[in-house]
């Protein structure tokens, strides 16, 4: 498993540090114990040699020397019997032997002149200083870990603010009054959000002002067209102004979509009903003469009615506009809808046409940009193929 989280890396570093500290402490204790054991062995051998030499000279045991070495002579007969039995069971009852009996270090000196059973009372001191040093280092490492992890807490807040921002909510604030690098990143991000918020607000104000100003002449044009006596021209002008009004409404939707300021109303709709509504939006007389519909298997889809019909409408409009015979075929089958027209294959990859204001001879190049934006909101995709002289756009 690859560890990418900064917190996980810090935890691993400190965990390894504490493990190494614990291993060092255990090794030092073991080393001290080994040194004490070595010293005890040397002391006991020296005691044995001294007692034997002293006995040869004076014919007795130097008990004052034993007291000075913190070694006592065991004289209790019952204890002596138990100790001898213990050493014999372990096969250590020899001329000289050392072992632990009931948590006591026992020495047996058994030669041709005397037999002694001694208790070595020299025990290792409690390593208080070493424990204090290692405990202090351990506590400092833990405090350092907590301090570093606490300093990373603003990252969680910043991450939450960025996630909120990515969902389109610009009303966030992530300023920090601290002086570390995280605070610098947070303050720079807050400044960027403020600039983006101001740019979006100015853009929205600009677009809404333009659309508002266009509504007035369109409304006046519709009133003037009603005064015409020629019904044919009257109907034609009325259709033109209706088309302009519809375009302004579509631009308003686009502005809301691109600014992430649009609340979806998701409901299940049959694809055939969505197609019929999209054909009505084309505002052309007798759309069936331009559009052939093949419903092989109708299906329902949970979508926003206004937005999704705009998708199909733009695909239909592009299909008719760029077809060589001004005719398209729509196929509804098994959870997909295809828009097919005869014509040359696209000159560029489909992704290039998703860019706003893509070079186009017959429009502003916004059709597929709008389609892509709305499909992304619905978590859908648009696929394109060219087969047998036909362009096939499929909404999946």
Image (spheres, helix red, strand yellow):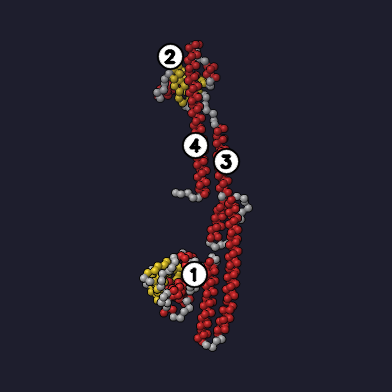
Give the label, 3 or 2, closer to the camera: 3
Image height of 147 relative to 346, above or below = above
SS of the residue under disc 1:
loop
Question: Reading the chain from its start, which is encountered first: label 3 or label 2?
Answer: 2
Please indicate, yes or no, whether residue 266 appears anywhere in the rendered image. Answer: no
Q: Nearer the viewer, mark 4 or mark 2?
A: 4
Where does label 1 land, which residue? Answer: 359
What whole-number distance in Å separates the C-alpha atoms at marks 1 and 3? 65 Å
Q: At numbered mark 3, what does the secondary structure look like: helix, strand or loop?
A: helix
Residue 2 pos. (x, y %):
46, 49
- Please name the residue that numbered disc 3 is placed on: 140
Relative placement, left or right, of 334 versus 355 is left
Counting from the top left corner in percent of width and height, residue 248 is at 54, 74
Q: Residue at x 45, y 13 (%)?
A: 113
Q: Position of residue 165 (x, y in %)?
A: 55, 60
The earlier-in-sequence mark between 1 and 3 is 3
Q: Which residue is mark 2?
A: 112
Where residue 325 appears, as percent x and y from the top left, is 41, 77
Tell us which disc is closer to us: 1 or 3: 1
Q: Residues within 10 Å of mark 1 (few under 14, many from 20)?
A: few
Residue at figure coordinates x 47%, y 49% from the top left = 3
- The kind of secondary structure element at disc 2 is loop
């Amino acid at each position: 498993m690859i560890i990418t989280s900064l917190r996980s890396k810090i935890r691993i570093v400190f965990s390894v540090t504490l493990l190494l500290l614990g291993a060092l402490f255990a090794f030092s204790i073991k080393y001290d114990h080994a040194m004490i054991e070595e010293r005890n062995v040397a002391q006991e051998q020296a005691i044995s040699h001294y007692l034997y030499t002293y006995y040869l000279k004076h014919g007795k045991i130097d008990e004052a020397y034993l007291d000075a070495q913190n070694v006592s002579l065991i004289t209790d007969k019952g204890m002596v019997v138990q100790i001898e039995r213990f050493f014999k069971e372990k096969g250590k009852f020899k001329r000289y032997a050392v072992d632990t009996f009931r948590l006591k270090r026992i020495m047996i000196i058994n030669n041709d002149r005397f037999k002694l059973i001694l208790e070595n009372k020299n025990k290792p001191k409690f390593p208080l200083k070493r424990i204090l040093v290692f405990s202090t280092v351990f506590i400092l490492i833990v405090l350092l870990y907590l301090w570093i992890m606490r300093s990373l807490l603003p990252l969680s807040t910043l991450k939450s603010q960025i996630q909120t921002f990515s969902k389109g909510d610009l009303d966030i604030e992530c300023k920090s009054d601290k002086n570390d690098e995280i605070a610098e990143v947070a303050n720079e991000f807050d400044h960027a959000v403020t600039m983006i918020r101001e740019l979006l607000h100015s853009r929205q104000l600009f677009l809404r002002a333009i659309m508002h100003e266009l509504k007035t002449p369109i409304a006046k044009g519709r009133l003037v067209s009603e005064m015409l006596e020629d019904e044919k021209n009257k109907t034609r002008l009325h259709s033109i102004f209706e088309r302009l009004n519809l375009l302004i409404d579509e631009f308003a939707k686009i502005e809301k979509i691109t600014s992430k300021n649009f609340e979806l109303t998701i409901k299940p709709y049959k694809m055939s009903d969505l197609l019929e509504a999209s054909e009505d939006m084309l505002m052309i007389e007798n759309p069936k003469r331009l559009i052939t519909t093949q419903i092989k298997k109708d299906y329902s889809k949970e979508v926003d009615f206004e937005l999704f019909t705009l998708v199909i409408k733009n695909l239909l409009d592009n299909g008719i506009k760029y077809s060589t015979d001004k005719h398209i075929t729509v196929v509804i089958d098994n959870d997909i809808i295809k828009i097919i027209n005869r014509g040359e294959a696209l000159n560029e990859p489909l992704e290039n046409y998703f860019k706003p204001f893509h070079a186009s001879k017959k429009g502003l190049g916004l059709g597929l940009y709008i389609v892509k934006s709305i499909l992304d909101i619905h978590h859908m995709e648009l696929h394109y193929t060219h087969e047998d002289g036909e362009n096939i756009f499929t909404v999946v």
